[in-house]
Amino acid sequence: MAAEKITVSRATFDQVILPVYAPAQFVPVKGKGSRVWDQQGKEYIDFSGGIAVTALGHCHPALVEALKCQGETLWHTSNIFTNEPALRLASKLIAATFAERVFFVNSGTEANEAAFKLARYYVGKKHSPYKTKIIAFHNAFHGRSLFAVSVGGQPKYSDGFGPKPADIVHVPFNDLAAVQAVIDDHTCAVVLEPIQGEGGIMPASQAFIEGVRALCDKHNALLVFDEVQSGMGRSGKLFAYQHYGVVPDILTTAKALGGGFPVSAMLTTHDIASVMAPGVHGTTYGGNPLACAVAEAAMDIINTDEVLNGVMQRRAQFESALKAIHSRLDVFSDIRGMGLLLGAVLKPEYADKARDILNAAAAEGVMILNAGTGVLRLAPSLIIEPADIDEGMQRLSRALEKVIRA
């Protein structure tokens, strides 16, 4: 007897899902490339990329094939055994970066949790168990576990959950003097996003990144880069740190790593990894064959000159279209970001309209995001078709006009 198929709609969400999200009023059911269709068959152009996740669009044939092949071969082994896809993916990440060791988990939060634990453990073993201070930044976002959300510099996400992990200090982003004022011999690590994502698509300045690296070296502190959102080609290089010529001690990546399949990684050096031993940290699902097979297929496509150079060409097309919208509507105060992580900053008089603009954009058939208050965020597929960019920006322009002239 066949199992009963339950009919669901957007209203079902309000009845069965924990109320921690406020999803759009339509339910996507199918995606191909940079186009998505909802339950009613309406088509949308996707500039949201699943929050910078679907870096190769929806249902890319190479990723579908990798998942199919692995799904017929080996799904899961746990951490009691290793597997070939995980070893291949780790080897490719090491070959393409500063890293010498990789640890796989399932989400950006878990990668950051591992990074923060490793930083404290390493410094405690190598220097002093009292050298525990972590310096992080206002408006940063590092995930939703209690440790990660405490390192993130947005109290609205961490307040109300009881005592927070101690010895975490927050200072203004891109303010080297502020870091210098709080870093000392008790500092274990400085944690930053090279491009703040949820905090408004704010890239770090060259001088800031270089200065923080020098301060970490001076005080025997580790530099941790959270590239959960900026990594895997999003910036126009495989990782954003490669634009700066400054190498971190630990790097985390997720989102685009699996092209939509949940997988994340923490990258570090032999020396830092050497303090770890079996049982010190772990995960059941991390590095599972399905996720790593898909991620390997995604990396093989993303880490090519064709795709990375194409990111910068598409960036120019988006920027040109946003400037054209601004020249007509006088709506933006800045366009910032790096590569295909774009932030269009709304002028102060429209800063409270971001949610209205997202809804109006959906009504016009284009999916966009916001980043904090008053910033429209675009994080499309790295290989989005130029024609889709043109059509999507026309739809966004109509949405903006309706909102600001309402």
Image (tube, rainbow, N blue to C red):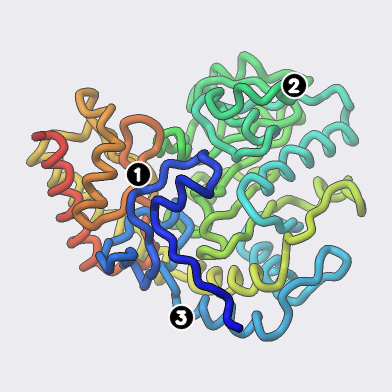
Picture coordinates of residue 168, whole percent (x, y): 69, 23
Q: Give the mark, 1 or 3, whose residue is nearer the N terminus.
A: 3
According to the image, label 1 marks what residue?
377
Instruction: Say which mark, if any, is on residue 158.
Output: none
Q: Residue at x 35, y 65 (%)?
A: 310
Going by the image, does 126 lie left or right of 43? right
Rendered view: 129 above or below 24: above
According to the image, label 3 marks what residue?
61
Tally of marks: 3
Q: Residue at x 36, y 30 (%)?
A: 373
> Which is more toward the observer, 281 or 382?
281
Q: Give the mark, 2 or 3, whose residue is nearer the N terminus.
A: 3
Badge 2 element: loop
According to the image, label 2 marks what residue?
166
Report, in whole angstroms, how far the alpha carbon at label 2 lies from the one at label 3. Answer: 46 Å
Q: Residue at x 22, y 28 (%)?
A: 350
Q: Residue at x 61, y 48 (%)?
A: 108
